[in-house]
Amino acid sequence: MFAQPSPLASRLATLSNQAKTRTVEEINEKIRKGDAQVLTAEEMKRLVESSGVEVAFKEIDVVTTGTFGAMCSSGAIVNLGHSDPPIKIDHAWINDVEVCHPGAAVDLFIGATNMSEKQPYEYGGGHIISELVAGEEVELRATAYGTDCYPRTSIKTQITKDDLNQFYLLNFRNCYQRYNCAVNSSDEIIYTYMSKLLPRIRNATFSGAGELNPLMNDPDYETMGMGTRIFLGGGKGYIIGEGTQHSPKNLNGTLMVKGDAKKMDPEFLQGAAFTKYGTSMYLGLGVPIPILNLGIAKKVAIRDSEIFTNVVDYSVPRRDRPNFGKVSYKELKSGSINVNDKKVRVSSLSSLKMAKKVCQTLKKWIDEGQFYLTAPVERLPTDTVFKPMRQTEEIPFVMSVMHPAITCTENEPIRAIAERIVTKSVNHILVVDDGGKLLGIVTSWDITRAMAEGKKALADIESRNVFTAKPDEPLEIASKRMAQHNISALPVIDIERKVLGIITSEDVSRLLGR
Amino acid sequence: MARILIRFNEEQVSEPIASQIIIEYKVPMAILSAHVNSKGGEILAEIPDSMQEQVVKAFRDRGVEVTVPKLIEVDSNKCFSCGTCIALCPVEAINFDEEGTVQFNKERCVGSTCSICVDACPARAIKSVKNGAKKS
């Protein structure tokens, strides 16, 4: 039209060439017209690898991210409506799971980890929420102290989600950006929230979707924050802020979310049980990331090989557990990792299959014009820290009561050991090798039995399967171990099984006053 | 190969019954798992198909209980394919298929004598089957 572009048109053209940005409004307009270009996180990464990030940015408007895993810090707020006569609930149970009454009269919070009084560890709040979402009927029992305005003191009734005024998922910590990989270096199986960990690092577990995780794809939280509409439990939900324990500087961001549970789908919200730990809830959560600029396109290209986490020893019952170095999510998803130069098989606790399904479902919703994006009202903080608890009372550790152990070697005659028990006035003698490493334990009772049965050799009476303690273990845990195995002392050893000392049940009762 | 689950009671466990049968019938027997103490126990063994009938009969003639074991039952409606069970399995009988769905290989699974995966399943989708009765 113009032989010579006007200065204004030329400036506009330059701007639009450089218009390396798009807005949420523009994307929503495209969704409305049915021509928004949406890819799942998995597809986007492939596109960036094959065609480069510039092309991917130019072509793609939205990338859907998602995760599906155990999210213990989840729960649902329900409002029951008033009974006649009215009750101001004091204690309440749903299907024998005690639930919390955080408000005035008939509001309840069903925490995912609240356990059934009849089937503890097997059935809990997560199962109730899932059953309610599925439309099943649950039994409510409640008691109250009775007031002039709320005279009723007990109630028992059956309810479904349709009977509830509000039934909202209200999760104060979801969607951990990444999580530890767990192992157990002790000699016994331990059951944790990271599931069953076999002794001597014979397996490992991890959690999280790695490169599919919403926060990992937007690590500076440029596109998400309060008000971001998300996929939650198979329905729509919203981010309402950062989750508790949000720790962005360590790439351990979390989300606080809410969503209408009446419209959710039980496939994406399932009760779970962790043996000897308790109950939880598996939840699907997905966030659409608008590709607003080239920088965001680059960030969503992140791969599992670039996301690392620590291999943490869960056998150490302390806040700061030792770790065996870093592994990538690529290694974790391969099924085996190296720990101390040994190949260890590793399992995922979260479901990658379901995480992909979250991404695909969210993509479908946007493609079909059922889901529009929102710009956050306020972004997630990027500078908060997760502090440890302030403790104003000290607790005792094994090292605070342990004392030197009386030892013997394997070739000593029983008589010499008996004499030592008398002169040192102790009940336990530890059998050690030349390097001071623990081999066994002999008690005064073993010696008495040897005399009665005429046994001469130490090997015939010593116990070789010895329960032990570590110096930095809380005394209470060591004390429980003694009670559990009905023994009266624990040798204290270091990581190489070298004897550091001994604690006895008398030491414990003196200190803990039992 | 056929799998048999041999169950000894307190009296039988001190007798060398399995050895006698192996020698007498010249049966190659692979022990897949064994949980035996002075109170009795179970051995899961693999023997050639062709010898299954006579070997089972030989054990039963000596009063020993033999069953062809049922293995693990998986409720695919409950399983959400997290895969927690996979690295626990000592015989690598569990894995992901191409779609990321957890699959149990019943040929490899040593069944109820192992059961290591059962209490690790967060969905409680795995059941160990013993004597035809379910043990969760």
Image: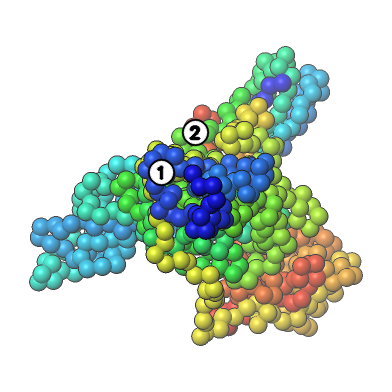
Residue A276 is tagged as: none
**Residue beneath disc 1:** A31
Residue A210 pos. (x, y %): 60, 52
Give the residue drawn at x 49%, y 70%.
A381
Residue A379 appears anywhere in the view: yes
Please tell me which residue lies in front, A139 or A103. A103
Q: Classify mark 1: residues with Cα within 10 Å, few (<14), some (14-19) or many (20+).
A: many
Q: In this view of the protein, which residue sits in the foreground, A474 or A29? A: A29
Neighbours of disc 2 within 10 Å: few (<14), some (14-19), many (20+): few
Give the residue type at disc 1.
Answer: Ile
Horizontal and vertical percent position of residue A194? 58, 55
- Residue named by callout 2: B76
- Residue at position x 69%, y 67% from top? A322
Across and down, in percent, residue A455 comes to 81, 61
Residue A78 in which image quadrant? bottom left
Expressed as whole percent of the image width and height from the top left, the position of residue B37 reads: 68, 43
Q: On the picture, is B87 further left or further right than A2?
A: right
Observer-nearest of A55 and A432: A55
Would residue A108 appear left or right of A242 to someone viewing this image?
Answer: left
Measure the alpha-carbon separation of dots 2 and 1.
Answer: 36 Å
